[in-house]
Image (cartoon, grey):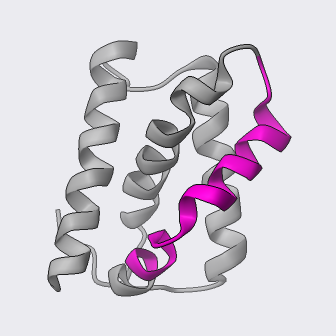
């Protein structure tokens, strides 16, 4: 695993754990769940079929702008912007589990 992938995974996992601490045992619910699902849907669209963690980490670079736009478009509820970056990172964390080379 490259350093870039390891660092990205740490960021993704930290955000996911942060949401889990705030939202309860299942990690996410309500509007934040919608934000995560919107980003995961966009990840599927952008990555297409099978992918690697390197490809996902590469997509993560520069993702702040497009994840924010996706969340704003699909999940614009009061206060949505406060959780957008954390939800986006949590979406990457969950999506990473589908990588061909994923190891917990």
Q: Quadrant of the N terminus?
A: bottom left
Q: Position of residue 27 (x, y in %)?
A: 38, 26
Bounds of the magenta segment: 56-77
Q: Quadrant of the C terminus?
A: bottom left
Left or right for 2, reference 90: left
Q: Of residues 95 and 74, which is closer to you in this image? A: 74
Q: Residue at x 77, y 39 (%)?
A: 72
In this rendering, does residue 85 appear at all?
yes
For residue 29, which quarter of the picture? top right
Q: Residue at x 28, y 65 (%)?
A: 8
Q: Position of residue 65 (x, y in %)?
A: 64, 58
Q: Position of residue 36 (x, y in %)?
A: 58, 42
Q: Is residue 15 above or below residue 5?
A: above
Q: Is residue 55 above or below residue 75?
A: below
Taking the magenta stretch, the answer to whether it contains residue 85 is no
Principal SS element in the magenta part? helix
Q: Residue at x 52, y 47 (%)?
A: 88
* Tag count: 0
Q: Residue at x 37, y 24 (%)?
A: 26
């Amino acid at each position: 695993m490259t350093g870039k992938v390891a660092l990205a995974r740490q960021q993704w996992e930290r955000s996911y754990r942060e949401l889990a601490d705030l939202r309860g045992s299942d990690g996410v619910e309500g509007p934040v769940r919608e934000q995560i699902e919107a980003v995961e849907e966009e990840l599927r669209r952008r990555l297409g079929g099978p992918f690697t963690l390197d490809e996902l980490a590469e997509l993560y670079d520069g993702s702040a702008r497009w994840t924010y736009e996706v969340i704003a478009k699909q999940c614009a509820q009061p206060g949505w912007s406060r959780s957008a970056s954390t939800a986006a990172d949590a979406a990457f964390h969950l999506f990473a589990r589908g990588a061909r080379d994923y190891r917990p």
